[in-house]
Amino acid sequence: MNTRKILTYIILLVVMLGNFTACSDSDNYSLNDFRINIATVTYNDSQSYSLLLDNGVKLWPAASNIYYKPHDNQRVFLNYTILSDKQGGYDHYIKINDMWDILTKPIIELTEANADSIGHDPIKINDFWIGNHFINAEFYFNYGGVRPHAINMVQNLQKKQIKNDTLKLELRHNSYNSLSDRLFSGLASFDLKPFRKEDKDSIPIQIKVKDWKGEQTYNLMYKYKHTNKAEVNAKIPTITSNQYR
């Protein structure tokens, strides 16, 4: 999906948020209404999948305007219309109007071997938040139009770890020597599930980021044995595509 189309959806969302018809328990849903949320794909097979919103709502795509090849645990922007209330083990059956992938990656270990490719170029953070066991990073970066930039979340085990079991991470950006000072916006999700521990119910997280003013520190709390849900429609950033990976 191109940038103009994505921006159009975001603008339409802002215009229509105040005009959505409230959903009732009587299945009185309008096919003219749509919602845009962040969701996670649950893969069943090559032609069958469901979607989980960050507030825990389970959606079954009973109809779709698009062809989508599902990948398990993939984060997506979802434009959808509700068709029904609870049935078949799902909170709603929906019609998918459109859907496009969010950059979704594991958190990787920073080593001497990958340090150069990971990079350490400036990147500006607009927001970090946790939803459905992912760190979500909304950011700005300078894109020169030569090749997609690399965005990664790393665990730097070369640095001394904090003693209170804080998960120490760094958001890294490789601009590949981009000379542009034009800022683009982006969104990426990084999987936290491998860091859960059976004897704990939460993990404090510290994220270091280098921006144009120097190194910045962000602190989050990952409460994985409690309800870890983001408010639906709370975070729908303006994003671009094809400029980072």
Image: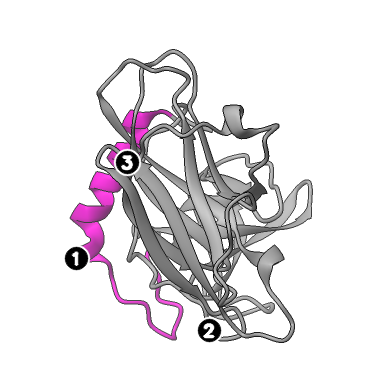
Q: Position of residue 129 (x, y in %)?
A: 41, 64
Question: Is any part of residue 236 visible from this angle?
Answer: no
Depicted 202 relative to depicted 10: above or below: below
Magenta segment includes 19: yes
Residue tagged by mark 1?
18
Q: Nearer the viewer, residue 188 or 198?
A: 198
Q: State which tag comes first along the sequence, 3 or 2.
A: 3
Q: Nearer the viewer, residue 245 or 153?
A: 153
State the mark number for residue 227. 2
Depicted 129 relative to depicted 190: above or below: below
Look at the image and give the residue range highlighted in magenta: 2-30
Q: Residues within 10 Å of mark 2 (few under 14, many from 20)?
A: few
Callout 3 amino acid: Asp
Magenta segment includes 174: no
Q: Residues within 10 Å of mark 1 (few under 14, many from 20)?
A: few
Circles 2 and 1, Cβ within 8 Å, touching? The answer is no
Q: Quadrant of residue 42?
A: bottom right
